[in-house]
Image: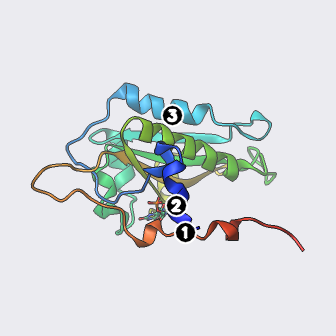
Amino acid sequence: MPDDVLVPKLHPLLATRWSPTTFDPGFELDADQTELLVEAARWAPSAGNSQPWAFIVSRRGDDTHRRLVRHLAASSSRWAPSASVLVANLAHRYVDGTDWEYSEFALYDLGQAVAHMTIQAQALGLFARQFRAFDRSALAHEFGVPPHWEVTTMSAFGRVPSSPDSATPQPLEAARMRRPIGDLLWTGP
Ligand SMILES: Cc1cc2nc3c(=O)[nH]c(=O)nc-3n(C[C@H](O)[C@H](O)[C@H](O)COP(=O)(O)O)c2cc1C
């Protein structure tokens, strides 16, 4: 069976999700919707309910946004600033003042919280692109992130432009390629 036959059977929030690199620079997310994204992350599961995550949340035009965009890489600075909301995703890696892991699942749990955030965004009619193309240590310094926390990734949220005179952005063919499902099923010896 061709791989994408099952895609229409996925929940629409999953089947229609993709990560744009063009956001509508005129679309604004209000404070309540922005808080809802964080709320979605808050309710994600985590190992031992350790909740090893924190977020630097900005809306385009606010001061936090101005401070975040300073640290984007050349590649992400072409598209991320026009997203409505930019979020830096932080993991609680170590116990304060030690090199003991706070939770060996901290990165796993942060990823899951961010996934919840992106699907909540999708439910609000938004798109999200997670990315690592920024200066993590400069951003940590800018926001006084202590060494036991790690600035891990960022997420951009917004709408894709839909004006009649500009083509609606489409997902890149290559980005939509997936390994076949048989590859994902570990059967052992
Ligand atoms: C941890 C992580 C880091 C990523 N880093 C970048 C990045 O630096 N720049 C970028 O354009 N996209 C980045 N992406 C987006 C991926 O390239 C994208 O999710 C992937 O190609 C699959 O496409 P899709 O999300 O549309 O299904 C990143 C995604 C994740 C989860």
> Label 2, on which residue?
5
Give the alpha-carbon distance from disc 3 to disc 1, as whole Å: 37 Å
Residue 169 spot, x, y in % from top left? 27, 59
Q: Nearer the viewer, mark 3 or mark 1?
A: 1
Q: Which of 52 and 99 lies nearest the eye of the viewer?
A: 52
Q: Which of 99 and 4 lies nearest the eye of the viewer?
A: 4
Judged from this view, the residue extending furthest toward the left is 165
Name the amino acid type tagged 2: Val
The residue under the point 69% across, 37% down is: 45
Name the amino acid type tagged 1: Pro
Colour theme: rainbow
- Where 5 sits versus 158, above or below? below
Q: Which of 64 and 55 lies nearest the eye of the viewer?
A: 55
Which circle marks residue 38 in the picture?
3
* 11 left or right, relative to 81: right
> Label 1, on which residue?
2
Contact flag, marks 3 and 1 (Cβ < 8 Å):
no
Element type where label 2 sits in the image: helix
Image quarter of residue 46:
top right
Image quarter of residue 52:
top right
Return the disc, 2 or 3, that comes first in the chain's sequence: 2
Residue 136 spot, x, y in % from top left? 51, 59
Contact flag, marks 1 and 2 (Cβ < 8 Å):
yes
From the Cβ of disc 1, is ligand 1 less than 8 Å away?
Answer: no
